[in-house]
């Protein structure tokens, strides 16, 4: 159901499914969920159309206050992974977070049968992640950082820096002061 009536209905339904869902949530049509009982969401959360929140297989997603997911964002913490988003985080459209990867050390059997390795993704407060970025397991994006559109983040992003590219590299420090 579209519009504000649809949002109120979705919030009422999902409030019973999520482990926690704070006040003033905006949940657009087409939200995909798996492992909803492993998802905690703070106040003033918005998720655009076609977002996915996946925390099955003992995965865990924790989202702070004032977090906005644009359309098509996927948070995938399945297979024992964990995603933690701080407060005041903005995530651009079609961005993907993936906490687990396939193991591939043995040549004697197919990659699909070698299992997975899961890691945590931490995004601290006041972070902006641009459209189409990919954030991989084991990454921390520190306070006030900006990740450019289309970046692939494979290592830690320092506080108050701007990164971009594949793999993501430092572009510049954010200006200081107010």
Image (cartoon, rainbow, N blue to C red):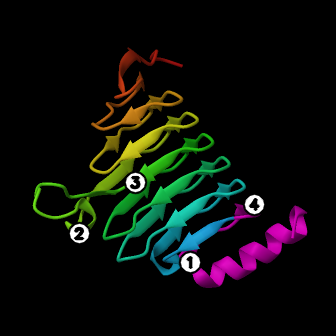
- Dot 2 or dot 3: first in sequence order is 3
SS category of the residue bearing label 4: loop
Residue found at x 34% / y 28%: 167
Neighbour tally class for label 1: few under 14, some 14-19, many 20 plus, Cα within 10 Å: some
Query: Mark number for residue 18?
Result: 1
SS category of the residue bearing label 1: loop
Quadrant of the rendered image containing residue 142: top left
Residue found at x 40% / y 16%: 171
- x, y percentage for residue 31? 67, 65
Against 129, residue 66 (above or below) is below
- Dot 3 or dot 1: first in sequence order is 1
Residue nearest the observer in this picture, 58 or 63 = 58
The stretch in magenta equals 1-30
Mark 2 — residue? Answer: 113
Q: Nearer the viewer, mark 2 or mark 1?
A: 2
Query: Mark number for residue 98?
Result: 3
Query: Mark number for residue 28?
Result: 4
- Dot 4 or dot 2: first in sequence order is 4
């Amino acid at each position: 159901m579209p519009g504000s009536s649809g949002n109120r209905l979705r919030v009422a339904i999902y409030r019973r499914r999520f482990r926690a869902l704070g006040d003033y949530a905006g949940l657009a049509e087409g939200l995909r969920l798996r492992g909803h009982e492993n998802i905690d969401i703070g106040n003033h959360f918005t998720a655009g159309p076609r977002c996915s929140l996946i925390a099955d297989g003992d995965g865990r997603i924790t989202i702070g206050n004032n977090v906005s997911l644009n359309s098509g964002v996927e948070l995938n913490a399945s297979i024992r992974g964990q995603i933690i988003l701080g407060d005041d985080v903005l995530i651009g459209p079609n961005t993907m977070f993936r906490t687990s990867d396939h193991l591939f050390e043995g040549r004697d059997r197919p990659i699909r049968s070698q299992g997975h390795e899961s890691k945590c993704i931490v995004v601290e407060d006041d972070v902006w992640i641009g459209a189409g970025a990919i954030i991989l397991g084991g990454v921390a994006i520190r306070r006030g950082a900006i990740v450019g559109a289309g970046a692939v983040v494979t290592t830690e992003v320092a506080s108050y820096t701007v990164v971009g590219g594949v793999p993501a590299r430092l572009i510049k420090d954010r200006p200081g002061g107010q």
